Amino acid sequence: MSAMILFLAVIAAIIAWWLAGQGLMAKPWLEVGSVGAAGMGDGDAGGSRLPAQKIGLGVFLAVVGALFTLFISAYLMRVSTQDWWTTPVPRLLYLNTGVLFASSLCLHWAAIQAARGQLDGLRTALLAGLATALAFVTGQVFAWRQLVTAGYTLSDDAATSFFYVISGLHGLHILGGMIALARTARLAGRQDAVSPRLRLGVELCAVYWHFMLAIWLVLLALFAGWAGSVVEFCRQLIA
Amino acid sequence: MAVVLVLVAIAVGSVLFHILSPWWWTPIASNWSYIDHTLVITFWITGAVFVAVVLFLAYCVWRFRHDPGRRAAYEPENRRLEGGLAAGTALGVVVMLAPGLFVWHQFITVPPGAAQVEVVGQQWLWSFRLPGADGKLGRAETRDVSPDNALGIDKADASALDDIVIEGGELHLPVGKPVKVLLRSIDVLHNFYVPEFRAKMDMIPGMVTYFWLTPTRTGTFDVLCAELCGVGHSVMRGTVVVDTEADYQVWLSEQPTFTQLQAQAEPEGLPVPAEMAQAPGER
Amino acid sequence: MVDASHDGNDLITPAAVEDVELYHPHSWWTRYVFSQDAKVIAIQYACTAIAIGLVALVLSWLMRIQLAFPGVLPFIDADRYYQFITMHGMIMVIYLLTALFLGGFGNYLIPLMVGARDMVFPYANMLSYWLYLLAVVVLVASFFTPGGPTGAGWTLYPPQAILANTPGGQQWGIILMLVSLIIFVIGFTMGGLNYVVTVLQGRTRGMTLMRLPLTVWGIFTATVMALLAFPALFVACVMMLFDRLAGTSFFMPAIVEMGEQLKHGGGSPIMFQHLFWFFGHPEVYIVALPAFGIVSDLISTHARKNIFGYRMMVWAIVIIGALSFVVWAHHMYVSGMNPYFGFFFATTTLIIAVPTAIKVYNWALTLWRGNIHLTLPMLFSLAFIVTFVNGGLTGLFLGNVVVDVPLSDTMFVVAHFHMVMGVAPILVIFGAIYHWYPKVTGRMLNEAMGQLHFWITFLGAYLIFFPMHYVGLVGVPRRYYEIGETSFVPASVHDLNVFITVVALIVGAAQMMFLFNLVWSLRHGREAGGNPWRATTLEWQTPQTPPVHGNWGKELPIVYRWAYDYSVPGAAEDFIPQNQPGTLGVTREAVA
């Protein structure tokens, strides 16, 4: 569970940082009558505040992060047992990674276009993002088929099981994101100018895409065994 | 004011129940009286806190019950009081934790020279294995379990051949000798639980867990399973007999070794657990 | 929704004009069934949770009857018994307590108490309820499948959870259980996002974190914990589902079942336990923290005195929330995990006793020099303190690693966790219902029935679970269909079992009267008015009772003071609502 503890430590640090600005040492019974006094702001102490949707996405990503970290924790627990053979990573995965990276870039580009208010560019970027995401998921399915053809089935051994389940869950998250992205793209297709709502939607999609790319990179490192060597290295440092 | 009386009755009644009720742990038969002592310390500390809190509540309710002419005090906080209470609590926690950790260290540190005994759990039967003349237990694997080899003992391991195997029978232990109990399961989780020994530990398929103890008095004790292991959980019983050294040696000499069991096992299978399933599982 | 908190000047503008995003129901269906109003969703959550909780209550009766009078109900065989304990435990912990505290009280109270019109994502909030209902339906469905529900124990430990000798293990029971939990987690995440973001972003002007009622603090912290802890349950369930359906070996080592080698191999049952308890221990506090928060507000209101040590109470909630993530393995002292973990987890576990104890002291000190009205919410709060202290103190036995060794997996554990996370939170739930029912319905609950309900429930629950500790001390293991013949259990323990069962049946029956009271008072209860308890917090200051959709009239309330201005020296009344302007009490420093 060390990976999860590490993750929680990061979350705890963020929460502590946020709480530190909330005046937890204040004596509320002495502050009667004031509404907007310094240090008492309901978010207005730091100037403009984020829209609820962005905070919501942030919290959601923390949950998703916890989910994948727990899988990684389980994977690392299992790696340390004796009967562990790493599954070879299909070459296709590296291509898929490139495609997902491109998808993330498209969304980044879309966010920039939305900020500039350029609807045409935005539409193109969103469609490109959608297409590349679809390509990624298709590529993942092909990677699975390659593995199955090579004889690595779901229940074959632990590493393979982990690979299918975790990459499958990641794929599901991408698919879920694609639904949101498709809705945003439809919204972009209907509007004449970039509305604040559309812009917010694009920004949310972009953040989600970058996050899923980051998770995928960590997972790839894990499957490729780089994580194992890092853990081994750390262990040697301690020992 | 019934509440006040009831609160006082709860505080006093709980203490009286503790002192007067006939229900207390069964007399100990191992070296783990330290555990009992730690438990008693914990009882005293927690009991005192419980009585104090409940009586304080009762007093407050009685003394500060609603009175139309009176107003409650206005007291947002009192750092000194809160700090003092926190410090007092921390002290109480240390007094309980320190002996606990000390005894835990003993609990997990097996003395050198402890004899080894293996307990194997399966649904819903206890089996035992003792090292033979060579003093070593041979290797064993769940994968090697077969009808004529119920414990999965590795036939290729020379030190396994003279191991003494007791399938579903009684385990005997000599009094006064430390023994390390190695725990293994071939199907689900079990827990080797002898109330008089105080010690217990789960048995996990694929792993060997352990605890150790020194039996301190002779007698016959029940073995129960203390980890839910399916419908037969409550009928998974066994017996441990703590003998004097002489009796133990007599008993030991009567037990068959693994090799002997293999020789006579050709026709019959392993004690089929399905028989055991009848008692609780039948609809 | 427009918010007015941006302008930094001291002119108090109307806190909000007509909002744009508030959802407006158009028909009966969208108003009462597929509603996006947090208050309606709260009631839906509460009714569903109580309904499924009744099932769990009946199951507990059946179990107790089997323990006291073995064989008197012939249909309770070992299979059924284990199915009953499993479903009883799982329903009570997840589908009743978690859902009622967070989905029920959270939905109703958070928007009202922070001065919002609704949750920030009403649509997701509605989905949350419907997914919860689906989870409950899937769970109940398992009662009607061949083989019945799972009998693996509520901890669902593999390998036995998915083996043929466990009821439902190779049939539908375990599958539906896991699927139901997965749906629950997804649904909860949708609701939880709402609770968290509403507290973060939905607070009205002037409502700083340190002016929040402790109820909101408790529910908020519990939700943050739940969002981080439930993924562990999700992961464990997904992996076990694969083990069961696809033959993978995440948790399944090589096993010989009924003399036959299974195909599984190499998996680790302990890994499941780590994942399960990584969720399972925070879960205890996910239930406890809302109870802590609510009981603080009940005591303060009904003792007409500010909560003592508000800041310490807030810090304690946050510290308990954080610490509860590093104590999970105290459920696993005798699980065969690395024994050296015991030192760490025993220490963290006992450290958590300190902030918890501080909370207890502060509740008691709130009563000190108070003006205590012995209303039903106050009675239930007192009962909560007694049972919680009792259950918390026995936790010190089980948390202290070596003391746990003889007691683990005995009835002592059962008594402990029922007292601390069964009885104590449920008493708070009752107190909270008596307290907020007038706001939800506009009428008071019947006092006479309430008194009877209180005394039977409190004394009965104590009489059930206090002696049960001693059954465990004698050495009777938990989860035993029958104890049978042993050399160490005296016959008198059986008499005690009979006593416990009889009391349990009576206490259960008293809950029926409570439910009757809930329904009866809807029509026949005394008219309550807007603020019958003369409380300070915002939910009592709504223009209508029950609050209408949108909670507030044209303008959101503005908060000028903390939630505990009771019996302020110099004030005319013995309470000052949070939204009452004026600087009365600024010179209170001398008093404090």
Image (cartoon, coloured by chain):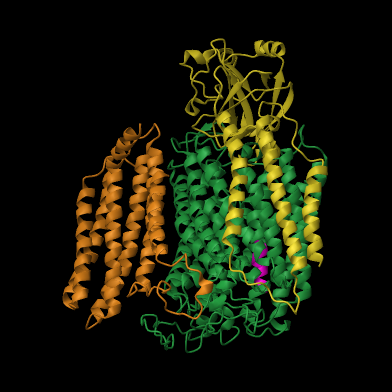
| Residue at screen point 34% across, 42% down | A160
| Residues drawn in magenta | C426-434
Residue B256: give x, y in percent of width and height: 62, 14
**Shown colour of chain C:** green
| Viewer can see residue C141 | no
From the viewer's perspective, is C435 left or right of A95? right
Give B215 or B91, whichever is nearer the viewer: B91
From the viewer's perspective, is C301 left or right of A50? right
Give C486 or C119, whichever is nearer the viewer: C119
Figure quadrant of residue B177: top right
Asked if C254 appears above or below A136 in the picture, the reply is above
**Shown colour of chain B:** yellow
Residue C344: give x, y in percent of width and height: 50, 41
| Viewer can see residue B275 | yes
- The quarter of the rendered structure image containing the N terminus of chain C is bottom left
Report the number of numbered marks: 0
Prevalent SS, magenta region: helix
- Quick one: which residue is furthest to the front in this view? C590
